[in-house]
Amino acid sequence: MQIKFIFSTFVLLVLILSQDVSQVSATNNVVPSVMRKISLVLKNSRLRSMPLSSVIRLLKNRNPAPGTRAYWVRRRLDSVFGAASSQRYGVRIPSPAIIAQQGYPYEEHFVTTRDGYVLSVHRISGPRGTKSGNANPRRKSVLLIHGLLMSSTGFLALSPQYSLGFILADAGCDVWLGNSRGNTYSRKHAWLNPDVDQSYWHFSQDEMGEYDVPAMIDYILAQTGQSQLIYMGYSQGGRVGFMAATNTTVANKIKLLVSIASTGYISAYRRDDPLINWAANYWRKLEMLGKGEVFQRDLVRLYWTLTACRIGSPLRGLCRIVMLRIWSERIYPEDFHEEDMIPVVFPNALEGSSARQLCQTFQVAFGELQKFDFGVAENRRCYGRATPPVYDLSKILCPVAVYWAENDYTVKIKDVERLEKSLPNLIRNYRVTSDPFDHVDFVYSSKAKELVYPDLLELLRRI
């Protein structure tokens, strides 16, 4: 019991550091301030008696039901710690609040897939200053899908003049920001509880391409009365788009498929890379052990973002290494611009996912763009063969545009050439030659506004 209480106190400390951002600084009075607040919260016997499992549930549930003990504790925490400083760390503001604060018309829609997953889709129906509900049916509908471990917030993280979601809205598009199953906004199901049922997390990118993308497309077309839309995917979002579009029925509903920083293939990751090899084995073991959810938002994202990755933190260098080692060949690039963007990029790359989804990413990197590999026995049961079937990109009949950068560690020229040979209707192959301009820069750098978005907007205008 004592160990549980100590650990519960530690978890609360993480919450405190994430809630009270204004207190976090490089000065020496941070710890005393935090400890005083811990004592204020823990002095009540009701909180001291709360078991560890309840503390964890509290951290996951920011809006508990009124009248419950969790509701009382949440009010107690909020009264002691106050509101976080969202102005300094805007990444903590959810997508709906970001859209509203910037003066854009906002709607939240929920789409249920055929296998029961409830997906949140954030809509920006027009330019800044227009009212929600006054969507113009003649506007081109654009479905934006985020990358691995991200959410719709990734397209809104910068100021409006640099964020792709807002840029498209100001250009006259009807923007729909999708959220894939299992992330912060789409962590619901018609009959499964993600906190209890591990089967909820038994999904890979295959299910996103087979269920999520088609469901969102059908919903948007039904809402707008249009027959086709523009699909735009960043990183994993592009790969999932390719998977979905191999279905002719889905491809017929896509006027243009835009893949940003993704060719579907990932030849950059090598098995002889110690870090990559360790990560691949780690996620595979977790998946085999039945560990479903990874990078849960509250416990991981908030701690690393608001404590370890903050300016002045002694662990900030570790955040930099991890982030850049994943997306860049240069571990310590002197030219990595916008140093203050680390607290923005890191949290938006940790929005929750499944272990199986990560396993498939490494599977694609080490082999082919194919369905999830369960192992020989299970593959025979699921696919009727010992190895997973490969996605046939030659079946993608809709027009495709690919935007990639020479200095993107995850996209190699041979991957682009392979994609060119596979696609029957590639209408745009746009290469960014600027150095530095890497994988994350497509959505998190102000340079994308001049290097990428003008050509993209011109392409959309002509479609």
Image: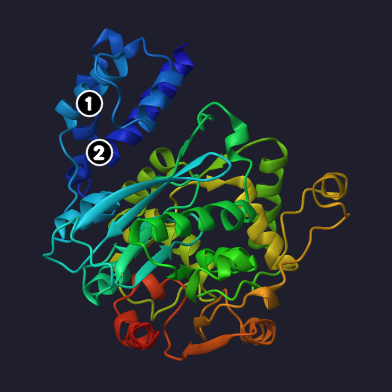
Q: Nearer the viewer, residue 307 or 158?
A: 158
Residue identified by numbered label 1? 77
Residue identified by numbered label 2? 19
Q: Amino acid at mark 1?
A: Leu
Residue 316 in view, yes or no: no
Quarter of the figure with residue 347: bottom left
433 horizontally vs 425: left or right: left
Q: Amino acid at mark 2?
A: Gln
Q: Residue at x 84, y 58 (%)?
A: 387
Task: Give the answer, above or below, for where 384 lies relative to 84.
Answer: below
Residue 275: percent from left, percent from top: 63, 60
Q: Residue at x 44, y 77 (%)?
A: 333
Q: Residue at x 21, y 68 (%)?
A: 159
Measured in 3D between alpha carbons, the distance from the residue under mark 1 to the one under mark 2, in whole angstroms, is 9 Å
Q: In which quadrant will I find the C terminus?
A: bottom left
Q: Nearer the viewer, residue 106 or 239?
A: 106
Q: Nearer the viewer, residue 375 or 30?
A: 375
Q: Are marks 1 and 2 in contact (CB under 8 Å)?
A: yes
**Total marks drawn?**
2
Residue 460 in view, yes or no: yes
Quarter of the figure with residue 57: top left
Residue 312: percent from left, percent from top: 28, 56
